[in-house]
C-alpha cells in the first residue's frame, strides 16, 4: 500500500478505540506493546542466536499486573502489518498464546468504553455532508434530498432529524401577496423615486430598461443599444420606414424679453460667416427652426461653445405689436453649463428669481420618507392594517421631470438692465424624434386633432378649462381648424424631406391612448386621401403659414394644467372595461385630455450632392408627463426604437459631426476625448502584452486620442520656419509668381519626406527622415537654434493663436472645389466659374493661412477599395511612388509601413527585474534596501509595454508618410457600400497636399488604422 493510502487509513482510524490484541509471535522489525484488558503487558523481542538459523520469536511477559493507561490509548494501526493481500493482524500460520489470567472488572470497563466509542462513531457524523451524500454514488438518487423514504432504512431516522432542523426548512411566504408582489419592492414608486436622485430618468426609462443596454451618461440613464441584433434593421428603418428616438435628455433654455435686446445680446456669440444667425428672417418669425454654433462673446473663430438649435415663438397675428418674445435654445447636456453661463453674462442676468418653471414638488420630506420606509415591530409575515384607515394617508407621487433638481437652487434669472428672463426648462418638455420616410404617416395615424367643445356640452366638471375658454374665441377655433387641415395634408407627402427645412407646425391633439389599436400595425402613406394636390404643392413650396405655428406649449401654466389633469392608465382601462361592447371606441367627450404639441421637421442630410434628404423626419415636443402616452402609440404604428448607438450611426451617414466627440475646439469635446482615452487605456491594460498590439512598433504615437494641438503646431512651424527666409530673399518684398523654392514649406511638395526606391516599403529609420526634413525645411530663426516645442510655445505666446475649426462657409466652399480632381468632365470644374472662385494659387493659400494658422477642417473620406476605417485612424499624404504604382495597377491598395523599434522595451524589462530584486530583498528581511529603491520605481510606473511614454515627438514625420489628420468616426457604410470615415485634417497640411498633387489625382489620401501597418487609398471631400 502506498504512503497516501497509509495516511488515509491512519486518518480514518484516529478516532477509533484501541483494539485489544493477544500476544503472538508476530514477525516485525521491532517490538510492539500489546495489551489485554486485564492481563499483563508483554513485549516481543527479536533474537538471532547465530547467523544462519531461522528467525525465532520469544515472548517475555513483564511482571506487571495492571495496564498502563497511557499505553492503552495507542492506535490499533501500529499492530497492523502490510501483506500482499492487504492489512492483516499477523502472518498466516503463526500461533497465538492465550494469557493465563484476566481481571474481570477491568476487562469489562475496557469493553464498555469500546462499545460506547463505537456507538458514538456510528450515530455522530464526522463531516458536514448530509446523510444521503455519504452513500456511494451508484446508490444516490435525486429524490433523496426531499424524500426520506428513498434512503436505506438504516439511514432514514437520521435523515428525518436533519430535515427537521431549522436550517433546512423552507421560508414561509406571506399569504397576502402573490409571487410577483413578493419579488418587488415594498413600495415600487418610492423605490423608483429614490433611484432617480443621482441620475435623471426619462419618462420612457422603464420601457428602455427592459429592452436596451442602459448606460449612465451626462447625468442621465440612457438606452445605448437594443438587446437584440438590430443594426441592419435600424438602418432599414431610417431608410425605408421609421426609427423612433427619445431625445428628452436634450436641454432647453428659454429667453423672454424684448426682441431687440435678445438679438443684441446674442449677436456677439455667433457670426454670419458660419451661416444664419438668431436674426434670420424665417427663424425670427417663428416659421422655421434654426441651427448654429455658439462662441464666447466676440471670440469668433476661437473658444467654441458648441452647436445649438433654436426656435422663436411666433406672433399670434401678423399685426401683433407685442414687444415680448420667447426664444427656446436646445442643446446637448454636455454643453449646457458653459452656454448657460455665457448667455447669463451677455444678457446681464445675474439676479435669480423664483422659478416660473413647473418644478416637481418635493414628493416626500426626509422625515416622511423615513416614516414610510420604517416598519413597525411586528412580524413581516403578518398583514398590517393602516392606522389612519386611508383617511389621512398621503399617496406617494411619481417623479415627473428632473428628480435631481434642488428646490432651493434658482432656475430662472432676470436682468435689471435689459429685462431679459432666462429659464432652465430641462426635462420640462419631452422631445421624440421620428426618422424615416414613414414618420409623417405614423404621426397622422397616432395623433388626432382635439375636438372643439360646443355650447350644449356639459363642461362644468371638466378640468380642461383653458381649452373651453379657447373654444369660445372664434378666431382660435378657426386657427385650430386650419392647423388640422395642414396636418392632414402631410398624408399626401411621400417623404419628410419634401417639406421645407425646419418647418414648424403647432397643434392641439386629443389623448392618443384612446385611438390605440388592439394589435401592432404598420402605417403606410395614402396619397389618395389628399385630393387637393394644389394645397399640397403650396405646402411644399411655401411651408406652413406663420399663423399655424402657434401652440399652447409655450404657456407654462397650460402645460402644468395638462400634466396635472392627465387621466391615469388605471382609470382609462377601467372605463374601457365598462364598455357595453368590448373593443369599441371609448368616447370621453369634454373629459378627454387636450395636449398642446409642436412638430418640427428635421432635414436629414443637407450637405454634398448624394443622398440629399436621407435621414429626414419629425421632432415632436410634448409637455412633461405625457411621454409614455405618445411613445406606445408610435410603436404600435410600426416605429422601431433606437438608442445612442443609432444616433451616432445616423449622424455618421449624414456626414455631420456628432456632439460632443466631433467638436475638439470646445470644452465638452476636450472632456469627452479625455474620458474616451482613459477608458480605452484601461481596456488596453486589461489584456496581457502578448494579446494586444504594440503601438510603438506599429508607429502609432496616440492610439487612444487625437493630438490636435501638436498636429496643428507641427504644420504651423513647418510653414513659419521657411516663410521669413523666403520673404527676405525676394527683392523689394514683392510676391509675384515666385519660384517654388520661395514658397513656404507648408506649400512645398519637395520638402515632404521621400520614401525609399522600393515601392510599397517605407523608410527604415523614421528618425533620420525627420532629421533630413528639419535640415531641409527649417532654418535657424536666430543665432541660437531652438527646439520645436520651444518654438511652438513662443509662437503661441506671441500671436495668441489657438486651435480652432474652420466653419466659414465661403472658405469651405473654396476648399471643397479645390479638393476635387480638376478634369474637363468634373462637375466641380463646371461650377467653379459660376461661383467666381479663385484658383489654387500661392496668394489664395497665404490669405487663408493668415487668418487661420492653426485650424482644422471637417472632411469626409471614402475608401477606393476594401477596408473599414475606425476611430483614431491616421490620415496621411501619399508619396509620388504611391501614385505611380496606383497608375500602373488600379487594384493597388496602398503601401505598407515598416515596423519601428521599441526604445522602451529595455527600460520596462529593467524595471521588472528591479521589482523582482526588491521583492526578494523584502522576503529576505532586507527592508532598508527595499525602501531605498522604491522611489525611482514609482516614477517608472507610467511605462506600459506597447505605448509611447513621455512627450510625443513630431507627429507629422514619425512615419514614412506625412501625417495630415485623424478620423473621429469610421465604419463600413451600408448607405454607399464601402468604408467611409469622418475626421479632421490640418488646414495648412491640406493646402500643402493639394498644391503638390497632380490635378488628376488631387484629393487622394492614405488611411492607416492604429493597429495596422497597411495604408489604403481614400478620396477626401469637404461637403458644405
Image (tube, rainbow, N blue to C red):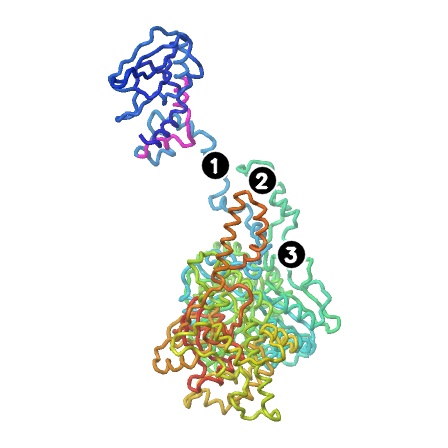
Could you say where residue 436 lies in the image, as x and y percent from the top left?
Answer: 45, 71
In the picture of the structure, the residue carrying the numbered disc 2 is 385
Label drawn at residue 171: 1
Asked whether residue 479 is drawn in magenta, I would say: no
Start-end of magenta stretch: 116-137
Residue depth check, mark 2 versus mark 3: number of the one nearer the observer: 3
Seen in the picture, residue 743 relative to 89 is either above or below; the reply is: below
In three-dimensional space, the C-alpha distance between marks 2 and 1, rounded to whole angstroms, equals 23 Å
Q: Are marks 3 and 1 in contact (CB under 8 Å)?
A: no
* In this rendering, position of residue 77 left or right of residue 476: left
The residue positioned 50% from the left and 50% from the top of the image is: 916
Among numbered discs 2 and 1, the one appearing first in the sequence: 1
List x then y, in percent, for residue 692. 43, 60
Disc 3/disc 1 C-alpha distance (Å): 41 Å
Q: Badge 1: few (under 14), some or many (20 or more) residues near its Cα, within 10 Å? A: few
Residue 582 visible from this viewpoint:
yes
Q: Does residue 372 lie above or below 900 as drawn?
A: above
Which label sits in the foreground, 3 or 1? Answer: 1
Question: Per the image, is 133 magenta?
Answer: yes
Residue at 64 percent of width and 56 percent of height: 361
Amino acid at each position: 500500500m502506498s504512503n497516501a493510502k497509509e495516511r488515509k487509513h491512519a486518518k480514518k482510524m484516529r478516532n477509533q478505540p484501541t483494539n485489544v490484541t493477544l500476544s503472538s509471535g508476530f514477525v516485525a522489525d521491532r517490538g510492539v506493546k500489546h495489551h489485554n484488558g486485564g492481563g499483563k503487558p508483554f513485549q516481543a523481542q527479536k533474537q538471532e542466536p547465530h547467523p544462519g538459523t531461522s528467525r525465532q520469536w520469544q515472548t517475555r511477559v513483564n511482571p506487571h499486573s495492571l495496564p498502563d493507561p497511557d499505553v492503552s490509548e495507542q492506535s490499533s494501526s501500529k499492530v497492523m502489518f502490510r501483506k500482499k493481500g492487504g492489512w492483516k493482524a499477523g502472518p498466516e500460520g503463526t500461533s497465538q498464546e492465550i494469557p493465563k489470567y484476566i481481571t474481570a472488572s477491568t476487562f469489562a470497563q475496557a469493553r464498555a468504553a469500546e462499545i460506547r466509542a463505537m456507538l458514538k462513531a456510528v450515530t455522530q457524523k464526522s463531516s458536514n455532508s448530509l446523510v444521503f451524500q455519504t452513500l456511494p454514488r451508484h446508490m444516490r438518487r435525486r429524490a433523496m434530498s426531499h424524500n426520506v423514504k428513498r434512503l436505506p432504512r438504516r439511514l432514514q431516522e437520521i435523515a428525518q432529524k436533519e430535515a427537521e432542523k431549522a436550517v433546512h426548512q423552507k421560508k414561509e411566504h406571506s399569504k397576502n401577496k402573490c409571487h410577483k408582489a413578493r419579488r418587488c419592492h415594498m413600495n415600487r414608486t418610492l423605490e423608483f423615486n429614490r433611484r432617480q436622485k443621482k441620475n435623471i430618468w426619462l419618462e420612457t426609462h422603464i420601457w428602455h430598461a427592459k429592452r436596451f443596454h442602459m448606460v449612465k451618461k451626462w447625468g442621465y440613464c440612457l438606452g445605448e443599444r437594443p438587446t437584440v441584433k438590430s443594426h441592419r434593421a435600424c438602418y432599414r428603418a431610417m431608410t425605408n420606414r421609421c426609427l423612433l428616438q427619445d431625445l428628452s435628455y436634450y436641454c432647453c433654455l428659454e429667453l423672454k424679453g424684448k426682441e431687440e435686446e435678445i438679438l443684441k445680446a446674442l449677436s456677439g456669440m455667433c457670426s454670419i460667416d458660419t451661416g444664419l444667425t438668431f436674426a434670420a428672417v424665417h427663424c425670427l418669425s417663428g416659421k422655421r427652426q434654426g441651427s448654429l454654433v455658439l462662441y464666447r462673446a466676440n471670440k469668433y473663430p476661437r473658444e467654441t461653445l458648441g452647436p445649438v438649435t433654436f426656435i422663436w415663438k411666433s406672433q399670434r397675428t401678423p399685426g401683433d405689436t407685442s414687444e415680448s418674445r420667447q426664444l427656446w435654445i436646445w442643446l446637448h447636456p454636455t454643453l449646457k453649463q458653459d452656454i448657460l453661463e455665457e448667455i447669463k453674462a451677455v444678457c446681464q442676468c445675474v439676479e435669480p428669481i423664483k422659478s416660473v418653471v413647473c418644478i416637481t414638488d418635493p414628493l416626500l420630506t426626509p422625515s416622511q420618507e423615513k416614516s414610510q420606509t420604517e416598519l413597525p415591530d411586528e412580524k413581516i409575515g403578518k398583514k398590517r392594517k393602516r392606522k389612519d384607515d386611508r383617511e389621512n394617508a398621503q399617496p406617494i407621487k411619481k417623479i415627473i421631470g428632473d428628480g435631481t433638481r434642488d428646490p432651493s437652487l434658482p432656475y430662472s434669472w432676470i436682468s435689471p438692465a435689459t429685462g431679459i428672463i432666462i429659464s432652465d426648462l430641462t426635462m420640462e418638455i419631452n422631445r421624440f424624434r421620428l426618422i424615416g420616410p414613414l414618420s409623417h404617416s405614423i404621426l397622422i395615424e397616432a395623433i388626432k386633432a382635439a375636438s372643439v367643445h360646443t355650447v350644449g356640452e356639459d363642461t362644468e366638471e371638466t378640468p380642461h378649462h383653458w381649452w373651453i375658454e379657447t373654444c369660445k374665441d372664434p378666431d382660435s377655433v378657426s386657427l385650430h381648424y386650419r392647423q388640422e387641415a395642414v396636418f392632414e395634408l402631410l398624408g399626401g407627402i411621400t417623404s419628410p424631406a419634401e417639406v421645407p427645412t425646419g418647418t414648424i407646425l403647432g397643434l392641439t391633439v386629443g389623448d392618443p391612448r384612446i385611438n390605440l389599436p388592439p394589435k401592432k400595425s404598420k402605417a403606410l402613406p395614402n396619397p389618395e386621401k389628399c385630393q387637393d394636390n394644389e394645397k399640397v404643392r403650396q405646402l411644399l413650396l411655401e411651408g406652413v403659414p406663420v399663423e399655424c405655428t402657434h401652440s399652447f406649449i409655450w404657456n407654462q401654466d397650460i402645460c402644468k394644467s395638462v400634466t396635472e389633469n392627465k387621466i391615469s392608465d388605471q382609470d382609462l382601462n377601467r372605463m374601457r372595461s365598462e364598455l357595453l361592447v368590448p373593443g369599441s371606441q371609448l368616447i370621453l367627450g369634454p373629459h378627454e385630455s387636450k395636449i398642446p404639441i409642436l412638430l418640427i421637421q428635421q432635414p436629414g442630410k443637407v450637405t454634398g450632392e448624394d443622398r440629399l434628404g436621407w435621414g429626414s423626419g419629425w421632432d415632436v415636443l410634448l409637455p412633461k408627463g405625457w411621454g409614455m402616452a405618445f411613445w406606445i402609440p408610435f410603436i404600435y404604428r410600426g416605429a422601431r426604437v433606437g438608442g445612442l448607438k443609432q444616433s451616432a450611426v445616423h449622424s455618421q451617414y449624414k456626414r455631420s459631426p456628432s456632439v460632443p466627440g466631433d467638436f475638439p475646439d470646445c470644452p465638452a469635446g476636450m472632456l469627452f476625448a479625455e474620458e474616451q482615452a482613459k477608458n480605452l487605456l484601461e481596456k488596453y491594460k486589461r489584456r496581457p502584452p502578448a494579446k494586444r498590439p504594440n503601438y510603438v512598433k506599429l508607429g502609432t504615437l496616440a492610439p487612444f486620442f487625437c493630438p490636435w494641438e501638436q498636429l496643428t503646431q507641427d504644420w504651423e512651424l513647418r510653414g513659419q520656419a521657411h516663410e521669413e527666409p523666403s520673404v527676405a530673399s525676394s527683392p523689394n518684398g514683392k510676391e509675384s509668381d515666385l519660384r517654388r523654392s520661395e514658397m513656404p514649406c507648408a506649400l512645398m511638395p519637395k520638402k515632404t519626406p521621400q520614401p525609399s526606391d522600393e515601392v510599397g516599403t517605407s523608410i527604415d529609420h523614421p528618425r533620420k527622415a525627420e532629421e533630413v526634413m528639419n535640415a531641409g525645411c527649417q532654418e535657424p530663426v536666430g543665432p541660437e537654434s531652438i527646439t520645436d516645442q520651444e518654438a511652438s510655445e513662443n509662437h503661441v505666446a506671441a500671436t495668441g493663436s489657438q486651435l480652432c475649426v474652420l466653419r466659414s462657409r465661403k472658405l469651405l466652399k473654396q476648399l471643397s472645389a479645390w479638393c476635387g480632381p480638376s478634369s474637363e468632365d468634373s462637375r466641380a470644374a463646371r461650377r467653379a466659374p459660376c461661383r467666381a472662385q479663385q484658383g489654387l494659387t500661392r496668394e489664395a493659400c497665404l490669405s487663408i493661412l493668415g487668418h487661420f494658422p492653426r485650424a482644422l477642417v471637417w472632411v469626409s473620406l471614402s475608401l477606393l477599395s476594401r477596408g473599414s476605417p475606425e476611430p483614431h485612424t491616421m490620415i496621411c499624404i501619399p508619396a509620388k511612388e504611391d501614385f505611380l504604382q496606383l497608375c500602373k495597377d488600379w487594384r493597388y491598395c496602398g503601401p505598407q509601413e515598416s515596423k519601428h523599434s521599441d526604445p522602451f522595451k529595455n527600460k520596462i524589462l529593467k524595471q521588472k527585474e528591479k521589482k523582482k530584486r526588491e521583492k526578494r530583498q523584502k522576503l529576505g528581511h532586507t527592508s532598508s534596501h527595499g525602501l531605498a529603491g522604491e522611489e525611482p520605481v514609482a516614477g517608472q510606473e507610467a511605462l506600459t509595454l506597447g505605448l509611447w511614454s513621455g512627450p510625443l515627438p513630431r507627429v507629422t514625420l514619425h512615419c514614412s508618410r506625412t501625417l495630415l489628420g485623424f478620423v473621429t468616426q469610421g465604419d463600413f457604410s451600408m448607405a454607399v457600400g464601402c468604408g467611409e470615415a469622418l475626421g479632421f485634417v490640418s488646414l495648412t497640411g491640406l493646402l500643402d497636399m493639394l498644391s503638390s498633387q497632380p490635378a488628376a489625382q488631387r484629393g487622394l489620401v492614405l488611411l492607416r488604422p492604429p493597429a495596422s501597418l497597411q495604408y489604403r487609398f481614400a478620396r477626401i471631400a469637404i461637403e458644405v
